[in-house]
Image (spheres, rainbow, N blue to C red):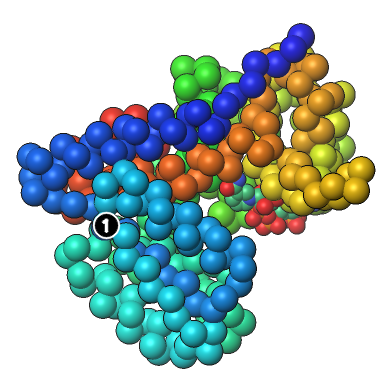
Amino acid sequence: MVAQVIDGKAFAAKVRAQVADQVAKLKEENGITPGLAVVLVGEDPASQVYVRSKGKQTVEVGMNSYEHKLDVDTSEEDLLALIDKLNNDPAVHGILVQLPLPKHLNEDLVINSIDPAKDVDGFHISNVGLLGTGQKSMVPCTPLGCLMMLRDYHGSLSGMDAVVIGRSNIVGKPMAQLLLGDSCTVTIAHSRTKDLPDVVRRADIVVAAVGRPEMVPGDWIKEGATVIDVGINRIERDGKNKLVGDVDYASAAERAGAITPVPGGVGPMTIACLLANTLTACCRSNGLPEPEGLTA
Ligand code: NDP
């Protein structure tokens, strides 16, 4: 079997176009422009690239982008004061604090100071609890993107055996909750899992979110399974820098029914889902119907 490639780049463009359509409608019919505030503390080069890209795409779909760049030695008090200001600003519907924060700042405290209704990353403890209890919440962007691609490919996921490799708060755990919400039978694997190959071989859906280059070989993949590779790993091969996933793409593609490539799979979906979440937050805060197909 040669796997169908799930093209995350094209899918993300479709999501952005849907968001842009809805934003245009909101402006025309309700006079509302969704706004996303992104807070960056310090000058971490990777974070700067992400923040730039988020700001650019926010403006491209017609939303307002508010960037707040703070010095690396900003005090917790000043950061919390800014978040409080954004929480109370009616023009801001989504707030994202770029992680990781410098060591002297308490990440949990900062994230939990964001108004949960504006927490477009879905990391606030209230949103974690709402997702865990199957209630309406803001859903973390990367797992939301994975879910959208799975639903698009399969339609219903009900009754499928899914394995999520990785149990982080930002990817693995919320991914497992979302799959459970769609009635999959879910296994969460991690570094202490016994016989990972056997666990993976039983799965109709494999979501790999580990951060170890090509650790899942093709012969672990059940014939016809769907493989979602969240991993982004920089490696050097044949003297060149390369991005690879957590799955060995070439061998997995020979057995899977469908697979996301790296790059061009899950990656582009993350910012598209951030925009979708901002739109959702804006609709909810204004008592308007949520955009269809853009939420969990
Ligand atoms: P974390 O480092 O927070 O979590 C990694 C998880 O993998 C942990 O639960 C760990 O288990 C598990 N793990 C480590 N080694 C093994 C092993 N040998 N076998 C099984 N499980 C193992 O990573 P993140 O969840 O933040 O990210 C995972 C990957 O996804 C990274 O490559 C990251 O760059 C990428 N990513 C991509 C995004 C995108 O937009 N596409 C967004 C976010 C992340 P344990 O808990 O036992 O230590």
Q: Residue 262, position in %: x, y?
A: 68, 37
- Callout 1: SS: strand
- Taking depth in this image into account, of 199 and 170 the one nearest to the observer is 170
Q: Is residue 148 above or below residue 76?
A: above
Number of on-image labels: 1
Residue drawn at 48 percent across, 54 percent down: 53
- Taking depth in this image into account, of 134 and 266 the one nearest to the observer is 266
Residue type beneath disc 1? Asn
In the rendered structure, the answer to whether residue 125 lies left or right of residue 223 reads left
Residue drawn at 81 percent across, 26 percent down: 250
For the C terminus, the image quarter is top left
Q: Residue 149, position in %: x, y?
A: 51, 28
For the N terminus, the image quarter is top right
Q: Is residue 199 above or below residue 47?
A: above
Q: Residue 108, position in %: x, y?
A: 50, 72
Toward which corner of the image does residue 243 lie, by quadrant?
top right
